[in-house]
Image (spheres, coloured by chain):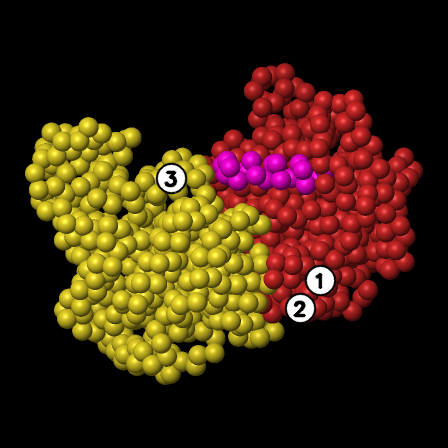
Chain colours: A red, B yellow
């Protein structure tokens, strides 16, 4: 009965090679030590602690360091302007020509070629603001993320944290849509993924207007071109990185006419850049925005093209509300993947559909925790999905806003918090493979990418074992568990 | 797809009569108002708030008052000395001859016929302690429950709250095992259930030694007789109450020899009181106590008799630990129901077994919240079980210790927090029927009880509609939703 149970877990069909088994022994040595320490001191178990508090401890975890090195395949759910580490983001605020002003207690940024007179907002060079007021920089830092010391107190409800979350996007808009920053930001997002051993990216983008100091404005079509140019630069510098695609994902909180325009724009973008545009989605707090059902005629129109859907759905704790019903519309619209799908375990029919149609659920554990859907990640619905072998990929959503970086933090949560004490390298390997299997790549590209990934995987095994042998003979720590 | 989804929910096969439909319209009027107020002010949604804070607001809920009146059938999971309201418990501390003393910062109680000299603990009459120290009564109150103003701070981890929880059982032991109190306590437990429109009880009892002032000690067999005598008194006073049965459930935190003794005791008790003894279980914090697998020979011995098992299993957030593995042993030992089974959604094979073998899961939402398995009850695994039509009963565990009373508070949580916005009277009716279906009664008794319950149900419908008509014509509030 036990084996029939565990044989349904993601990764259970994998048979580890001898080399993988050796690496797994090392991994499980780390995992069980950390897991059992958590069991003995439940208040310190990191997936049960708010990420704002657990982050620095995760970085000391051997399991986390193992996961960072592991070739994780693809990152399939992140947002354009919340992708890079907060350190990089902060450094951008030292750019030349960057102005700031405060309206409604929120900082706004913009680049100007010369001083700007504005009746609404008194723009000053950020450099000058820093000189005039020694506490300005501390204030500025609070505007770049949603990190706070006491999240329980500062964010009593989901609407409070979402309000701050949306404000942060707004704060960063003028900073990140300056063309040189826009491109270096995207380059950095790719670099951080690459350094985290991620080889491929599919990201949601709203395609905002991008501007130059001289007044030039790039519209959606040109913005896509900026992405593609940057990607080409990046691939020239890092030839091992496989590539990236954009899921065009504008705001859901709009009227029907605007969605008509989205359809026209998406269709045109796909025609212009058939390879780079992966598909379409709508973004914004589902609970407060418009459900998919309000835009069915437009979405059916779009479905006639070769654009795939990657809908956010049921990023909610409210069962039976319109947010929750997005699951049904997403599936009926033949979505390729589902963003979050947090409510899915409350819908047996949807569970059956995603399994039979191989619709992957994009799980972003840290996002769901800090945005207040669930506190203790052991109660995340993904634990059911992983245990029962549903199509799942682990994603990072908006790492920039909570001080994470790339994908490994979320993988750590999936491995330590959303799966059994016994889950091992097989789960991690399958999650990596899932990220390629459920990507928007066509079959030929998938198979090429899979070959690249396997090379990385074998190199990873070698590196781990080499390091381990080194540690045994010359290092500080004995590792007893090698066969 | 929607109807195929909702047709799997508990209660979905029920077709409401016209009268039931009218009552349902009233209920849903209350529910949707309250649910949507929660949606608009998520921080105030009661199933998402710690019960210590939400209790007084629940008592103002129209949904809660409706549920209190509804004939709920049976209460199938509660513990002997944590059953009554804390008000009744507090009043017991004014009993004559009750002494108290403090050891290790915890109050102990005992009844003595005259003043008692004890080197360990300086016993004084509780009456005298109250007179000597004006703050004593406040201290005493803190010892009767686990209620605190700031649970997040006072109970940083599950082990902290469990420690206090176990201490509370210990504090109350000398108070409640005094024979007259023991009997009046049980009588009161039945009365509170009866007043909450519960007709039948199956409760866990450790069968502690019970004492008289003159030194007489009643051992397990005689203690059962005390229960039976009290039950007979109660049924004489309240002939509509159907009855009660005991699940003999001593501590799991013992050695093998003690479990050998349990087997002998349980067998003898079942022979002596075949009707009153429903079965066997083991109690205590599973994470720290012994798993079932340690006592397999003894339990197999017991399985040869006609004693049914009602095992606690997987009352835990830790997947893949021995606590979690209790699920497998419970099912393999052919358990009749599972207490908590909180980890069950992480075990697809167990999910399949409980469905095919009709093993009911006893869900105690408030217990799981205050004992720190889950904060927001919308993330309770029971939400999956209810949505997917698993055999579920709603239970109250230890209402005395968190200021609840009888069964309605937990039913409220199941209805508002563990099920869809759309779930209605059909769910509540099925939960009531489930409590009879999955009880330990034999088929004939079940069918008799079901007839009694149906009478209560029809009376309930009449009462609700009568009250509603009255309210419409003479009362304060318009009810628009009557057909």
Q: Is residue B26 visible?
A: no
At 90% across and 52% down in the image, what residue appears? A448
At 63% across and 34% down in the image, what residue appears? A58
Question: What secondary structure is found at the residue carrying circle 1?
Answer: loop
Q: What subunit carries mark 2?
A: A
Q: Indicate whether A342 appears above or below A115.
A: below
B75 relative position to A82: left or right? left
Question: What secondary structure is found at the residue carrying circle 2?
Answer: helix
- Disc 2 designates what residue? A353
Q: Residues within 10 Å of mark 3 (few under 14, many from 20)?
A: few
Q: Which mark is residue A359?
A: 1
At 71% across and 56% down in the image, what residue appears? A12
Quarter holding the N terminus of chain B? bottom right
- Disc 3 designates what residue? B163
| Tag 1 and tag 2, C-beta contact below 8 Å | yes
Stretch of the chain drawn in magenta: A26-43
Mark closer to the chain start, 1 or 2: 2
Q: What subunit carries mark 1?
A: A
Q: Are marks 3 and 1 on the same chain?
A: no
Q: Nearer the viewer, residue A116 or B164?
A: B164
Q: What subunit carries mark 3?
A: B
């Amino acid at each position: 009965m036990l084996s029939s149970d565990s044989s349904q877990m993601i990764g259970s069909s994998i048979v580890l090679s001898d080399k993988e088994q050796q690496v797994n022994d090392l991994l499980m040595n780390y995992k069980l030590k950390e897991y059992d320490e958590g069991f003995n001191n439940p208040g310190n178990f990191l997936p049960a602690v708010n990420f704002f508090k657990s982050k620095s401890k995760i970085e000391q975890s051997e399991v986390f360091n193992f996961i960072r090195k592991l070739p994780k395949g693809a990152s399939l759910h992140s947002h354009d302007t919340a992708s890079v580490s907060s350190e990089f983001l902060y450094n951008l605020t030292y750019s030349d020509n960057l102005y700031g002003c405060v309206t409604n207690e929120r900082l706004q940024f913009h680049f100007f070629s010369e001083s700007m007179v504005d009746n609404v907002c008194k723009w000053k060079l950020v450099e000058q603001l820093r000189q005039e007021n020694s506490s300005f920089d501390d204030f500025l830092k609070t505007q770049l993320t949603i990190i706070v010391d006491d999240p329980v107190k500062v964010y009593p409800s989901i609407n409070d944290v979402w309000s701050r979350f949306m404000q942060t996007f707004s704060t960063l808009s003028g900073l990140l849509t300056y063309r040189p920053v826009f491109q270096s930001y995207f380059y950095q997002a790719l670099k951080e993924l690459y350094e985290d051993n991620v080889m491929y990216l599919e990201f949601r983008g709203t395609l905002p207007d991008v501007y130059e100091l001289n007044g030039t404005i790039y519209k959606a079509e040109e913005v896509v071109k900026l992405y593609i140019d940057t990607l080409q630069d990046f691939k020239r510098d890092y030839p091992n990185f496989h590539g990236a695609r954009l899921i065009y994902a504008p705001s859901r909180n709009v009227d029907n006419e605007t969605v008509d325009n989205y359809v026209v724009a998406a269709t045109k973008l796909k025609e212009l850049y058939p390879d780079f545009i992966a598909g379409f989605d709508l973004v914004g707090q589902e609970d407060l925005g418009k459900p998919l059902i309000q835009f069915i005629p437009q979405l059916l129109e779009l479905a006639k093209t070769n654009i795939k859907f990657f809908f956010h759905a049921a990023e909610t704790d409210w069962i039976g509300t319109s947010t929750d019903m997005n699951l049904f519309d997403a599936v009926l619209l033949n979505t390729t993947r589902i963003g979050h799908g947090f409510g899915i375990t409350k819908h047996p029919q949807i569970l059956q559909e995603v399994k039979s149609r191989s619709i992957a659920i994009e799980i972003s554990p840290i996002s769901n925790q800090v945005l207040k859907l669930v506190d203790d990640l052991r109660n995340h619905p993904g634990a059911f999905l992983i245990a029962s072998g549903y199509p799942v990929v682990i994603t990072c959503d908006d790492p920039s806003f909570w001080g994470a970086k790339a994908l490994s933090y979320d993988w750590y949560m999936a491995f330590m918090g959303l799966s059994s004490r016994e889950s091992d390298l097989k789960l991690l390997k399958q999650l990596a493979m899932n990220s390629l299997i459920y990507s928007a790549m066509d079959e030929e590209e998938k198979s090429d990418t899979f070959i690249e990934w396997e090379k990385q995987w074998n190199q990873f095994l070698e590196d781990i074992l080499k390091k381990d042998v080194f540690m045994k003979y010359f290092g500080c720590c004995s590792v007893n568990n090698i066969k």
